[in-house]
Every structure is written in C-alpha cells, then in structure tokens.
C-alpha cells in the first residue's frame, strides 16, 4: 500500500496511542477468518491514525499468512483506476473466471478502449475474483483514503463490502469524516483527549520552549499527526519565535491540504486572505480577496475548496477544517503574497481599528512610525483578546517599525516585561539585550536593570538611587511609567537588602505620586517598609468582597504580594488564590510560578501542609520547563522551611545551603528560619535560638515576615534552652513593633510567646488568652498552643485537662499533615508520659469504666457489682472529667479495649432516644439507657 508503506515509525506509533478500543474491534473482525468475513470503515479526520490502524491490521494479516490487497492515496479520475491498482496482484487469474467475466475486467481497466462497462457488472466480476481467491486462502483488502478514489471504484468497494460477511474476506477502508460508504459498519477514530495529546507531544517536543509546546498543543486539536509533525517542522523566527503561522511539513500538507495546489486562482486568493485573518467573516474575506485579485470574487469560487475538504462555509463565516490547513495555505505562499493579503485585509477593515493596525503591521517591511504607534497602542486590547504571546509580538513588531531608537527600546522593554510574565527568561534577556542596544532614556535604563535583576538568580548591584530620582522626575509627566519604575525599584531594593536611606528615598518618591491606591504603589510600600507602612498597606488592601469582582490577575497578584510582605498570610492566600486560575488561563507561567511559591510559603505558616505541597509541586513542574532561576531559588528556600517543619532536618539544612550559594540577600531570613526550625526539631535548642534570634533582635524597620514567623519557635527554643530572660527582652521589643504594624502573623503568635515565657502564676491565664483568639485560619498556631498548654497542665498535675488539650493538639497536627511533628514532641517528653487511667481513677471508678467500655449499661454494671444504677452513674459522672472525655465511646481507646460488640441493641436504641429527647451530652453519655 503506497501511503501506508511510507508511514514513518514515529507517526505509526503516534497513530496507535490511545487506540486500544479500535484495535480490539479490528481484532474481533479479523478473528472471524477463515470461517467468515466482514467489512469495516474507519472514519475520522486527517492524521488521526486511520492509516496506522490499517497498518496494524495489515501486519496481523501478514503474520497469519493471509492474502493482502492494498491501495491508498489519490488516484486519477479515470473510472475503475483505483480498482485496477487494488486488484493488480490477482488480475493474472481473471481468465479462470467463467466465460466473459475476465473480459469485463480487462475492458474496465483498458484506458482509451471505449466506454467502460456498467459498474454493477464490474462489481460482480471483481467480487467473483476475490471470492475465488479467498476460497484457497483468506483474503484481507485494505483501502486507505477512499474519498480520493474515483467514484466507480468507491461504488465497487461498497458493493463488495456489503457481501463479504459469508466469505473468508475482510475489507477495511479508511474514509474522511463527512463521507460514508452506505450500509458498511463505521468505526470512529477521534482525536486524542488532552492528557494523551500532552503525553504524545512530550515525546516529540521535549526540547522546545514551553510556550511553543502550548501553542502546538492548542493548534493540533488532539490530532496525532500534527502533534508529531508540528514540533519537527517548528523553527524560531527572531528572538520571540513569534509566528504568523506554525511551519508545516510536507507530510502535514499532504494529509490536510493535498488539493490546495489544484484550486482555481481566485479560490487560492480567498483562502490566503482567510488564512491571514483570524475572524472568519465571509463578507470581509470576499471583499479583501477582491482587492487582492483586482476583480470581484464571489462566494461560489470557494466551492472547490469545500469539495477538497479544506474549509467549511455557512451563511456568514468561513472556517478551515483544521488549523493545519490554514498553516499549509500560508506556507504555500511567498512572503510578498502574504503581505499583499494583509494589506488587502487592512483596506476593508476601516471600522475595526485594532484589526486594521494588526494587518497593516504585517503588510510592510521598513520603518513606519504611524503603524508602529498604532500597534503599540493596540497591544493592550490584543493582550485581552488574544493573549500574552500576541501582545509580545505586537510590541516587538512595533519596535521593528519604529524609527526612533529610544522609542524602539522602550517598546522592546514592554515586550520583555510580558515575556518575563510568561516565564521565558531567555526571551526576556534577549529582548532586554536588544533594548539596551538602543538609546534608552534614564528611566528605561533603570527599568531594564530592574527587569534583568528580578529575572536573575543572583541580583547585581545597580543604580537604585538613580531610579529613585527618575521616579520623582516622572511623577508629574508620566505617572504610569513612574509607578512601573517605583515597583521595579522596590523589588530591586527588596532583593538586594537596601539600606534605610535608600528605602526612605523610595518611600519619599512614592509619597509624591498621587495614585496611592494603585496596586503597584501599595506593593512597593509593602516591599521596602513592611513594618513602618504595614498599617497603611493593610488599610488599602481590598476586602474579600471586592476581590471577588476583580478579574485582573496583575492587580490580585500585586495585592497578594503586598499582603505577604506585611505578614498577612491569610489575606495573601485569598488574593493569590484568585490570581492563579487567571494566570493559568492566560498562559503566564512565569508569574504563575512566582504566585504559587509565595502562596505555598504562606499556606505552610497557616497550617495547610498538604495544600502547600501541591502548590510547590505545581511550581516545580512549571519551573522544570521555564527554568526561572530567581523563582527556583525562592521555591528551594520554601522547600527548606517545609522540610524543617516536617522534621527532615538534614534535608532542610542541605536545601538552605544550596540557596545560600546563590547569594540572594532577600532569602537569607528564610534560610535562617529553615535552619532554626531544623535545629528545633532535632532538640538542639541553643543552636535553634542562635539561628532565630537575628530574625527578631533588630530595629523595627528591619523586621520582615520571617521574623514574625519565628516568634513561636523562638519562644520554644528559649524556654527549653535556658535563655528565657534574654528572650523576654527581645519579645518585649516585639510588643512595641506590634503597636506599629497590624501584621496578623505577629499578633497571632505573640500571645503564645507571652504564655510560654511567663511565670507560672500568670501563664495559665495567658494560655487562655492565646487560645481565645480566632484561630480559624491558623490551625498550626492553634495546635502548637494547645500542645504547649497541655504540657504546662501536665507539669502542674492537671492530668485530665492535660489529656484533653494534648489529644486536641494531636488531632490538629494530624489534620495539618504534621503527625510526625506531634510524634516528635511526644517523644521529647517521653520521660514524663501522659498519666494512665489507673493513675487518674480510683480502683472502683476504673472497674466501672472498664465495664462501661465493654458495652454494659449502668443497670447491668450495677447488677454485676451489687450496687445501685444511680451509684454507677455517679462514679462515671466523676470519672469522665478526670479523663478529659464526655462520652462512653471514648472509654474504649483510653482503656485499649476492642470496640464493644453490637449485641446490646436495646442499649443503642435507648441511647439514641435519649439524644432525641434532648438529654444533655454529659448526662446522656453517663446515664446511657436509663
């Protein structure tokens, strides 16, 4: 079979991916041989794997030793030409047919020898020929691309397919969607689902940039051939790799657009215009095609393209049957023709200025400032409608068309900002490099330095003071640019650990700007002065109700960044969580990875460790593709904190040392936090104290969220490491900080520290204050506080209350995902274990409790012990508070008994009735069936 024989191995394997169901159906058909036969039509679009399935069936037939007849591809329009190719291997035996039948076949196949015989006669003879041969040995006929064969051959195939059931013959045909063979069973071969498509693309596009892979995935629409061939044909064009179309291979052109070269000239003009357009409005396409052709083009010129299965028409729109068809149309034309088509399209779009500008920009070669200005202005709407890649292309193309060097550089920097948002570090730096070759203004030089800095793993010293001056100069003339520069300067200062004077200069420059509610302004203040301006920032952050109506990912992300910086992880999680799905939808993987890492660190502190792990894992998957060094460093430091919290001290220190080698000043506090938590988990309290102390013992304005996060572990280290007095002085200074900033991360932990380091006379009251806070969003703080209070109660021989508190803490730790942490704390106090039931209860109470745990009712216990049931109830009533429980069912785990058998049904019924009747919880638990 011509075309199937040329099917490459990789295309063949791709065509069989996810086709287990279809292969099973074909196998069930083939196993009928030699006792019976059948026919099947494989139906689907081009490139979905029909040929691969036919090839698999053919290989099975060859292994079984059956006869094979095959034909595929386009034949000419001569009647029966396809049938002649199919039957060629057996035509030598046609003379053995009954008299006259061989002559009918020869007459049908001899070109130019007169009119062909009737189709029905040819079909009967052809059927007789193959049944005669099949009587000797089963036969399999495989016919690919039936739609391209001549009509006479198709009719004969349909005739034979309907009659082979009782013969040792299988006929398998492949046909494009939208065509059919009457009365022949159909096996649908659909496109791949997204997970299968991603797996296939990963095999063939592993080295391509993530944005290219996503574009290919989008355009392939699950088509296996496209998923294999588009990566192989892809070639970068300039620093962006910005495509007017994706390059296509000859295999794709043959499969999807084989009839393109045979179309009339006006039809090709119309298809070219449609291919440079992205809307598909039929009236616009015909009008532009008329301009391109220089004469009117009517809709009927497209009939040939419809017949060639290239396009689909309805009343008002033209659609290519697959995006690859559009790419093939564009690839078949010269650049000059594509430019002419864009110019024609622009001419008819006077009422659509953004689209008109887009096409004009693609219709010229040299500088054109008018078009460049229009395209730069239109990039925002293109971003909203077509995504980040299109916006980058618009700005890059605008720069190419710009004559002025400074303006050209400014537009390249704007494109670089979008590229950074995509997570494409190499592209970002390439665009910055190109911009810096232009005559940039001082403001753009500062922006270029800041943008390069935030995309590098190791920030370099830069002209931050010059940037502050530029902000001041721009505040009146271009406040929007001033805000951009303010944010980039604040980010740079944050990452490099700027001195107080520089931070003060940034704040002063911010104060000169009037847009104080702009998220860039708020984020800048939070980054450079999170304590001194913490209250200002907190007051300007939006409420949850407001957030719900903000679909802008950048606004949400910047507000989330600000909340994170000032120590409000709960609000940061809300804001960043709202930004993430928008960033995913927009494909802005770079900013998405940053957002995921920031939220993961906040979720860790709040106490939802499983979610933190999921966020970190998603960020890891993205970074494996985008390779953003700065975000990788931040993620690794967050991993170090997570490992320390989970008791993996060695791994936490190893990760911290790895990040330290990158010399990220802004991550030093996080690394100290990770090391301090690791030492604390190992019981090395003095070392933990020394690691954590610098995070808290510094001037107010130098404190950061890591210092707030260190309050509780610092108090634990001081309490157990005999540095309580010194720690109390440091925490007293933090009390002053708490009067300046409303940071919840600080305020929610200070009550715990007060209680842990307090004298016994006041400690219990302080523990009650700590637990009286609203800790709904703070399960880790709640669990630690309950654990510390439970330990304190046990030391003061309040065993029952201690048990209740410690059991609650253990439950909280397990919900957090920190069961190992609880276990380690239990191990650290193994020399002072929880008192047993025998120690808490009198012998009589212990006996009664054991019988109650075995499932006996109060009356049954009374009869066994020769006491009144009221006495039994009184004993249990006194025992329950001592044990810190409130129901009989809780006795079983305390006494380490098996669950009571379900024999006493009456007990359960009466117990339920008591609950329905409104008896109090404690009375119901004690009196049970009374």
Image (spheres, rainbow, N blue to C red):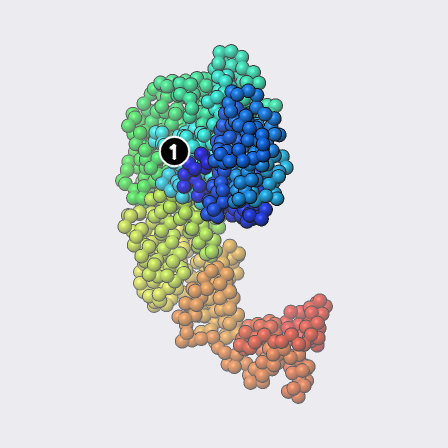
Residue 532 spot, x, y in % from top left: 40, 46
Q: Residues within 10 Å of mark 1 (few under 14, many from 20)?
A: some
Residue nearest the observer in this picture, 461 or 735 = 461
* As drawn, 42 above or below 407: below
Q: Residue at the location (62% across, 38% down)?
A: 162
Q: Residue at the location (53% across, 56% down)?
A: 776
Q: Residue at the location (49% across, 31% down)?
A: 85
Residue 913 spot, x, y in % from top left: 71, 70
Q: Report helix, strand or loop for mark 1.
A: loop
Residue that lies at the very extreme toward the bottom in this rendered image: 866
Residue that lies at the very extreme toward the front in this rendered image: 99
Numbered marks: total: 1
Query: In which image quadrant can residue 605 be found?
Result: bottom left
Residue nearest the observer in this picture, 757 or 910 = 910
**Residue 510 seen by the camera:** no
Residue underneath mark 1: 234
**Residue 367 seen by the camera:** yes
Residue 174 spot, x, y in % from top left: 53, 36
Query: In which image quadrant can residue 406 be found?
Result: top left
- 901 on left or right of 193: right
Residue nearest the observer in this picture, 754 or 856 = 856
Residue nearest the observer in this picture, 42 or 273 = 42
Residue that lies at the very extreme toward the top in this rendered image: 295
Residue 732 spot, x, y in % from top left: 39, 58
Q: Quadrant location of the C terminus?
A: bottom right
Q: Residue at the location (49% across, 45% down)?
A: 66
- 910 on left or right of 720: right
* As drawn, 707 above or below 474: below
């Amino acid at each position: 079979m011509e075309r199937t024989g040329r099917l490459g191995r990789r295309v063949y394997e791709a065509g069989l991916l996810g086709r287990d169901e279809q292969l099973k159906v074909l196998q069930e058909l083939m196993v009928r041989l030699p006792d019976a036969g059948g026919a099947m039509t494989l139906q689907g679009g081009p490139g979905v794997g029909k040929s691969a399935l036919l090839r698999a069936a053919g290989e099975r037939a060859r292994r079984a030793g059956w006869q094979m007849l095959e034909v595929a591809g386009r034949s000419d329009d001569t009647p029966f030409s396809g049938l002649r190719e199919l039957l060629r291997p057996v035509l030598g035996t046609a003379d053995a047919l009954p008299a006259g039948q061989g002559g009918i076949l020869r007459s049908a196949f001899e070109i130019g020898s007169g009119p062909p015989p009737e189709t029905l006669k040819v079909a009967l003879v052809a059927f007789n020929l193959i049944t005669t041969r099949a009587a000797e040995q089963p036969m399999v006929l495989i016919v690919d691309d039936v739609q391209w064969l001549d009509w006479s051959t198709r009719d004969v195939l349909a005739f034979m397919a309907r009659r082979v059931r009782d013969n040792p013959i299988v006929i398998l045909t492949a046909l494009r969607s939208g065509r059919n063979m009457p009365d022949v069973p159909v096996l649908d071969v659909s496109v791949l689902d997204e997970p299968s498509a991603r797996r296939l693309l990963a095999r063939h596009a592993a080295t391509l940039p993530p944005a290219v892979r996503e574009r290919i995935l989008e355009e392939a629409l699950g088509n296996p051939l496209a998923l294999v061939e588009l990566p192989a044909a892809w070639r970068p064009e300039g620093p962006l790799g910005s495509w007017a179309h994706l390059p296509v291979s000859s295999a794709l052109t043959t499969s999807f657009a084989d009839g393109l070269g045979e179309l009339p000239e006006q039809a090709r003009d119309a298809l070219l215009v449609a291919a440079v357009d992205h809307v598909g409005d039929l009236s616009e396409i015909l009008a532009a095609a008329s301009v391109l052709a220089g004469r009117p083009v009517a809709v009927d010129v497209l009939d040939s393209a419809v017949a060639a299965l290239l396009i689909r028409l309805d009343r008002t729109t033209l659609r290519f049957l697959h995006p690859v068809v559009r790419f093939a149309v564009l690839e078949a034309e010269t650049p000059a023709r594509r430019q002419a088509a864009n110019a024609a399209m622009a001419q008819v779009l006077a009422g659509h200025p953004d689209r008109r500008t887009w096409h004009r920009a693609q219709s010229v070669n040299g500088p054109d400032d008018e078009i460049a200005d229009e395209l730069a202005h239109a990039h925002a709407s293109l971003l909203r409608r077509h995504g980040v890649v299109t916006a980058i292309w618009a700005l890059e193309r605008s720069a190419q068309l710009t004559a002025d060097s400074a303006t050209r550089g400014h537009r390249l920097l704007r494109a670089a900002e979008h590229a950074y948002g995509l997570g494409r570090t190499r592209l970002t730096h390439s665009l910055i490099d190109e911009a810096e070759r232009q005559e940039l203004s001082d403001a753009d030089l500062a922006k270029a330095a800041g943008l390069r800095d935030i995309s590098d793993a190791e920030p370099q010293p830069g002209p931050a003071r010059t940037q502050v001056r530029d902000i001041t100069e721009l505040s009146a003339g271009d406040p929007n640019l001033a805000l951009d520069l303010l944010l980039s300067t604040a980010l740079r200062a944050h990452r490099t650990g700027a001195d107080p004077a520089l931070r003060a200069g940034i704040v002063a420059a911010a104060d000169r700007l009037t847009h104080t509610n702009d998220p860039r302004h708020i984020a800048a203040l939070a980054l450079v002065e999170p304590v001194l301006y913490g209250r200002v920032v907190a007051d300007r952050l939006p409420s949850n109700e407001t957030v719900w109506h903000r679909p802008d990912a950048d606004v949400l992300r910047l507000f989330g960044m600000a909340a994170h910086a000032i120590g409000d992880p709960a609000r940061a999680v809300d804001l960043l969580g709202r930004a993430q799905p928008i960033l995913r939808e927009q494909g802005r993987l770079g900013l998405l990875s940053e957002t995921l890492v920031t939220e993961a660190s906040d979720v860790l502190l709040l106490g939802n460790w499983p979610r933190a792990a999921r966020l970190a894992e998603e960020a890891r998957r993205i970074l494996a593709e985008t390779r953003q060094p700065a975000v990788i460093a931040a993620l690794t430091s967050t991993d170090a904190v997570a490992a320390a919290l989970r008791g993996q001290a060695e791994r936490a220190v190893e990760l911290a040392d790895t990040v330290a080698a990158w010399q990220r000043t802004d991550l030093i506090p996080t690394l100290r936090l990770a090391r301090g938590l690791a030492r604390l988990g190992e019981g090395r309290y003095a070392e933990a104290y020394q690691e954590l102390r610098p995070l808290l013992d510094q001037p107010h304005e130098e404190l950061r969220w890591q210092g707030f996060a260190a309050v509780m572990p610092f108090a634990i280290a001081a309490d157990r490491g005999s540095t309580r007095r010194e720690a109390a002085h440091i925490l007293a200074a933090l009390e002053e900080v708490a009067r300046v900033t409303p940071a919840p991360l600080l305020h929610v932990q200070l009550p715990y520290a007060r209680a842990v380091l307090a004298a016994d006379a006041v400690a219990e009251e302080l523990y009650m204050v700590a637990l009286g806070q609203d800790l709904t969003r703070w399960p880790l703080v709640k669990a630690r506080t309950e654990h510390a209070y439970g330990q304190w109660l046990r030391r003061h021989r309040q065993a029952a209350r201690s048990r209740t508190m410690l059991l609650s803490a253990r439950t909280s730790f397990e919900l957090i995902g920190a069961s190992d942490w609880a276990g380690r704390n239990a191990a650290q106090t193994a020399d002072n274990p929880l008192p047993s039931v025998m120690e808490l209860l009198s012998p009589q109470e212990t006996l009664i409790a054991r019988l109650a745990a075995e499932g006996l009712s109060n009356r049954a216990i009374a009869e066994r012990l020769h006491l009144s049931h009221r006495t039994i109830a009184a004993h249990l009533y006194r025992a329950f508070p001592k044990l810190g429980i409130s129901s009989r069912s809780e006795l079983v785990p305390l006494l380490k008994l098996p669950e009571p058998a379900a024999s006493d049904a009456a007990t359960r019924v009466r117990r339920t009735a008591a609950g329905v009747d409104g008896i109090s919880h404690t009375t119901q638990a004690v009196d049970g069936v009374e």
